[in-house]
Amino acid sequence: MRVRVRGTSMAPALPDGSFVLVDPRAYRSRPPEPGDVVLARHPYVRDLCLVKRVAEVARQGRVALVGDCAEASTDSRDFGAVGLDHVLGRVVLRLSP
């Protein structure tokens, strides 16, 4: 699926307005790994999806997500780790700036 990045939380790797390609099947056979960039549902804001980097995967099936630009990011440093069920797929390609 194609997703547009909004905001500067993943800059400079994914600047505001970038389009990314997300593989929704990436984690069917394995969990995310630290360093992966993923699309995930926000834990508290309905219908809001986030593009973030996986910082840590805990044994309890939770994933810590962070933005590359910490001062511009709302992420696990604010809302804590999210369940694996919140991870919708892995970003596999940046399509445009």
Image (tube, helix red, strand yellow):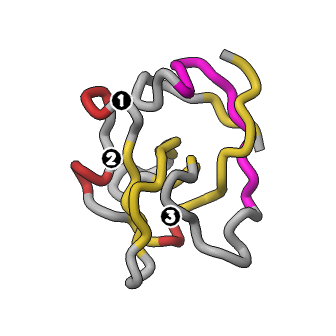
| Whether residue 24 is situated above or below residue 31 in the rendered picture | above
Residue 12 as seen in the image, left or right of residue 27: left
Q: Which mark is residue 86?
A: 3
Answer whether residue 18 is magenta in the image: yes
Up/down of 3 relative to 44, above or below: above
* Residue toward you, 55 or 49: 55
Provide residue 95's location: percent of width, then percent of height: 76, 26
Mark in front: 2 vs 3? 2
Q: Is residue 68 left or right of residue 70?
A: right
Q: Quadrant of residue 31?
A: bottom right
Question: How many angstroms separate mark 2 from mark 3 (CA)?
Answer: 13 Å
- The residue that appears at 53% across and 71% down in the rendered structure is 85
Q: Categorize mark 2 by other alpha carbons within 10 Å: few (<14), some (14-19), many (20+).
A: many
Q: Between disc 3 and disc 1, whose residue precedes?
A: 1
Other-residue count near label 3 (Cα within 10 Å), few / some / many at <14 / 14–19 / ≥20:
some
Tell me the residue that label 2 is attached to.
Answer: 75
Residue 44 lies, in percent from the top left, at 33, 55
Residue 24: x %, y % from top left: 73, 58
The amino acid at mark 2 is Asp
Whichever of labels 2 and 3 marks the residue nearer the N terminus, that label is 2
Q: Residue at x 46, y 24 (%)?
A: 11
Which residue was labeled with disc 1? 69
The quadrant the N terminus occupies is top right
| Cβ–Cβ under 8 Å for marks 2 and 3 | no
| Neighbours of disc 1 within 10 Å: few (<14), some (14-19), many (20+) | some
Q: Quadrant of the C terminus?
A: top right
Q: Nearer the viewer, mark 2 or mark 1?
A: 1
Magenta-colored span: 13-24
